[in-house]
Image: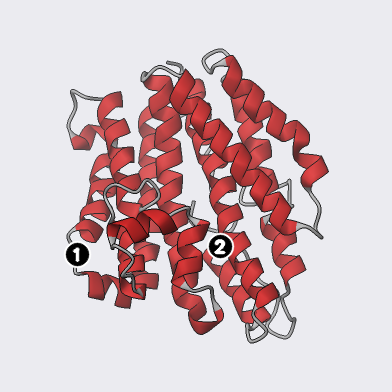
Amino acid sequence: MLSRIAESLFWIGRYIERADATARLLDVHVQTILEDPWAEEDLVCRTLLSVMNREAPAATTVVGRRFVLDQLAFDRSTPSAIAGSLTAARENARRAREVISTELWEAVNGTWNQLPSHLTPTRPHSFFTWVRERAALVSGIVDQSISRDDTWNFLVLGRSVERADMTARLLATRALAGTTGPDWATLLRSCGAHEAYLRRFRGLGSDESAAEFLLTDRLFPRSVVHALGQAQSCLDSLDPAVDQASVGGARRTLGHARTSLEYGDVPELIEQLPARMLDVQRACSAASDAIRQRYFPSGALTQWAGGVL
């Protein structure tokens, strides 16, 4: 496969997942601001901007919900915002049109065409719901209409790396926001994890077990450990006959991040949650760089606006 096509597939997976995860993160925090009269809006918004590596205004300026939505949801000029991610996903799908299925192209292109009509600042929840539904549609088409070859592996590799990174960011915002942030039950619902969590713990949940579930559960697809493991599996399929060193360290980097969570002491992980989630974000960034150098070295470095990824 040509490196430019492989790169486009990788970033389709990343951008669609980024839009989905950012919508989930913003939805839960915007609802908290609207519904909780005791929530400190400026603190919650600055925490969100910090975790997403976006620069906040000076401390003398109060940061509100509208500013965060403009920066992280409706800005079409940067792929670190939802609208920008969907735009970038469509551009990469156009470049890889020769290898993706017609259904996948129509889903991504249709999402891009519908985007302007959903950019309504007064109805953010409706916008976030629409983004999640479109991302679910794209994800389902990827899994149902594409053979498990290099095309699928690059798409799912990008999706998995981004999912691990974004779940880490979601957990970091919960830890940093403290009592002003959403509770763990709300956070689980935002990930579609609440019912799976209740089944595993038989309805006897706690904050610690909720954090453990989103961090280390091997079966739930949005947990950090599962996403990192899925990324490793894709790398294994892309180069089954080579050792870790020849994949630019991507397997080793992801494997180290996964095992440090999977076999770590859970109370210690929760106590050090912001720092450990930053480690996961750095591992995803390093793995992304290694993948780029191994599979598409001629491509320009794509990164998060403002810093990591």
Q: Is residue 86 left or right of residue 238?
A: right
Q: Is residue 43 visible?
A: yes
Between residue 77 and residue 36, name the one nearer to us: 36
The circle drawn on residue 53 is 2
Pair 1/2: label in front: 1
Between residue 228 and residue 241, name the one nearer to us: 228
User: Which x, y percent locates residue 211?
Assistant: 35, 67
**Residue beneath the point at 79% across and 49% down:** 119
**Residue beneath the point at 32% across and 60% down:** 213
**Residue beneath the point at 51% across and 15% down:** 99
Q: Is residue 78 visible?
A: no
Q: Is residue 298 left or right of residue 214?
A: right
Between residue 69 and residue 217, name the one nearer to us: 217
Q: Residues within 10 Å of mark 1 (few under 14, many from 20)?
A: few
User: Which x, y percent locates residue 255?
Assistant: 23, 47
User: What residue sits right under mark 1 in the picture?
Assistant: 264
| Amino acid type, mark 2 | Asn
Between residue 37 and residue 233, name the one nearer to us: 37
User: Which x, y percent locates residue 235?
Assistant: 30, 32
Mark 1 vs mark 2, CA separation in Å: 27 Å
